[in-house]
Amino acid sequence: MSEKIICAGFGGQGVMLLGQLLAYAANERGFNTLWYPSYGPETRGGTANCSVTISEVQVNSPVISKADTVIVMNKPSLEKFEEKVKPQGKLFVNSSLIDQQSTRTDIEAFYIPVNEIAGKLGNFKVANMVMLGAYLAKTQLFDDQLMIKLLENLFGEKKAHLIGLNHQAITAGRDYYNQNYK
């Protein structure tokens, strides 16, 4: 098993956390994992991205030339990373902020209105967890219980009150995917 993922969006949309959770989950399940953030000049409001490689064999490079999955949370990220999806790969698009369809016919594209779904949950900051839920529904890589355990570890006692909301967001993303793409 090997899965190469690129997560991209504006700084502040939680793409780094999304990537970290996938990397931690893979590590927890015994896979070799590499999480590579791109910080550079990116700050809240600028473009940010990270790559995650999950593999049964040793991962030798953080560079992903072609990804199995690309997750984009904003239009500049779609424009930059759509070409990085390998043929027969997956593209997850935040259709709340991106009003265009993929131009590629050799990939699977999933349009998830993560901002609207997060808004219905009462907090736009969990849009990344909605997208994570949709991704997990498609790939079946990890279950929600593992994600909740990892969130508890990451958030600690100080942010423990956010665990329930994040779990609701993951579930809402799974539900949206299952209702619209299964």
Image: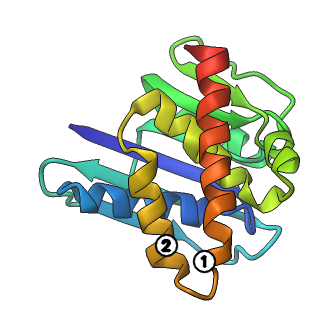
- Image side of residue 23 versus residue 135, left or right: left
For the point 50% across and 28% down, which residue is it?
90
Q: Residues within 10 Å of mark 1 (few under 14, many from 20)?
A: few
Q: Which residue is more in the foreground, 36 or 139?
A: 139
The label on residue 29 is none
For the point 45% across and 56% down, which residue is it?
147
Up the image or down, 106 lies above or below 144; here it is above
Q: Residues within 10 Å of mark 2 (few under 14, many from 20)?
A: some
> Which x, y percent locates residue 40?
61, 77
> Which x, y percent locates residue 71?
59, 42
The quadrant where residue 96 appears: top right
Up the image or down, 135 lies above or below 111; here it is below
| Residue under pointer 2 | 152
| Residue under pointer 1 | 160
The quadrant where residue 92 appears: top right
Q: Which residue is more in the foreground, 117 or 50?
A: 117
Task: List the single residue furthest toward the left.
Answer: 57
Q: CA distance from mark 1 to mark 2?
A: 7 Å
Q: Are marks 1 and 2 in contact (CB under 8 Å)?
A: yes
Which element type, helix, strand or loop, lies under badge 2?
helix
For the point 49% across and 77% down, which residue is it?
154
Which element type, helix, strand or loop, lies under badge 1?
helix
Q: Is residue 126 visible?
A: yes
> Which x, y percent locates residue 167?
60, 54
Residue flagged by tag 2: what amino acid is it?
Glu
For the point 50% across and 68% down, which residue is it?
151
> Which x, y percent locates residue 61?
27, 60
- Colour scheme used in the picture? rainbow
Residue flagged by tag 1: what amino acid is it?
Ala
Q: Is residue 104 visible?
A: no
